[in-house]
Amino acid sequence: MMFGYREQCLAHDTGPRHPESPDRLRAIRRALSHEHGVEYVAPASASPETVTMVHDSDYVEQVREFCADGGGQWDADTVAVSDTWDAALASAGCAVWAVDAALDGASGRETPFSIGRPPGHHAVTDDAMGFCFFNNAAIATETAVERVDRVAIIDWDVHHGNGTNDIFYERDDVFYASLHEEGLYPGTGAVEETGAGEGTGRTLNLPLPPGSDDAVYLYAFKEAIMPALERFDPELLLVSAGFDAHERDPISRMRVSTEGFGALTARCRSLSDRLDAALAFVLEGGYGLESISDGVRMINDVCDGREPVESDNSVSESGRTVVDTAREQLFDAADWND
């Protein structure tokens, strides 16, 4: 794989007790140091003008001034230092590079993966929250729709990507699908949220019950995400790849294994091949250093040809009910004949 990475992202210093620390990227780099087919690219930072394709210009200026004044606690969870401004632009730039590389024809073991930080999927148009300042995946998607007609985002971070959800909620050129733990921060992403206006039927939320494992996630992919995207027919598939649903992550109750993330990756690759869609990954959350590095390394291995071992567990009734309900909600709302 090709990994977009900037040392500048390490300068976003969240303090010794914050789960979203620079050690996350260091752990990923260590895990990949002896892996086959790993290539690093140092993309240019996103410009403030590119960021304002998604975020309000007043908010972007507010972030710049906050960091220039030394930073501090933006809210209870989200912290900045003076270097956070440059780190956030670098992180957004890595995401833009990933979609550009994918659309330029990267495939297979060259699949692009942005490993920037701070992460982004909680950032809304005019505010930072949940460790996120700029919505990297949304910014990258906005640049992509200047080149293609339809983009799909699959967000498997354990938290609902409320920012990405809201930014594209009324758009018909972006499909957003989220697999997240029900009841977890930020408390959004109900199955009834399927888009509005021109975006009706372009949002699929799967609030999975706590304790959901590989079997539930793969069932959700097979029964809800894949049929929806086959009908939407995107030209780019962008994965918001968080690893906090891992069974060893310290802040969630989900039970996805490393092999499970490999199986999800294999499904994404299969879908992108079948739809002739470009494929790229953007790092979101994941707060166990071993689990996040194992997850990224597994994605690299699968893109290099490894066949992951799929779970033979049965799908829980509670998980099956959520997935089936979400699918019905989506297809009842969508006008797939337009």
Image (tube, rainbow, N blue to C red):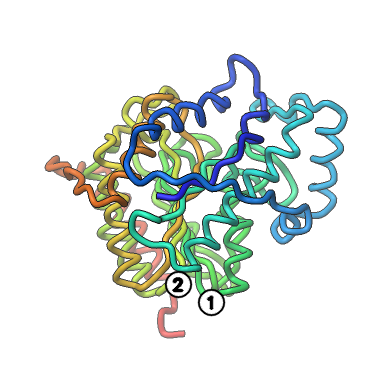
Comparing 15 with 2, the one in front is: 2
The three-letter code of the residue at mark 2 reads Glu
Choose top left, top right, bottom left or bottom right for residue 335: bottom left
Judge whether residue 38 can be spotted in this image.
Answer: yes
Left or right, 155 with respect to 164, comes to left
Residue 69 in picture, x, y percent from top left: 87, 29
Relative side of 41 to 133, left or right? left
The local secondary structure at tag 2 comes to loop
Picture coordinates of residue 45, whole percent (x, y): 69, 49
Question: Does residue 190 appear in this view?
Answer: no
Q: Quadrant of residue 154?
A: bottom left
Q: Nearer the viewer, residue 213 or 279?
A: 279
Give the residue displayed 44% in from the left and 51% down from the top.
Answer: 178
The secondary element bearing badge 1 is classed as loop
**Residue 235 marker:** 2
- Left or right of residue 51, residue 120 in this image: left
Q: Position of residue 243 (x, y in %)?
A: 41, 36
Q: Position of residue 200 (x, y in %)?
A: 52, 70
How packed mark 2 is, by other alpha carbons closer than 10 Å (few <14, some 14-19, many 20 or more), is many
* Front residue of 272 and 331: 272
Classify 10 Å Cα crowding around label 1: few (below 14), some (14-19), many (20 and above).
Answer: some
Residue at 85 percent of width and 33 percent of height: 68
Instruction: State the residue position of label 1.
Output: 149
Most distant residue in the top direction: 16
Query: Is there a contact, CB below 8 Å, between mark 2 and mark 1?
Result: yes
Given the image, on which type of amino acid does mark 1 rest? Asp
- For marks 2 and 1 on the same chain, the one whose residue lies earlier in the sequence: 1
The residue at the point 58 percent across, 67 percent down is 144
Given residues 209 and 70, the one toward you in this image is 70
From this view, report whether residue 26 is shown above or below residue 5: above
Q: Is residue 316 left or right of residue 331?
A: left
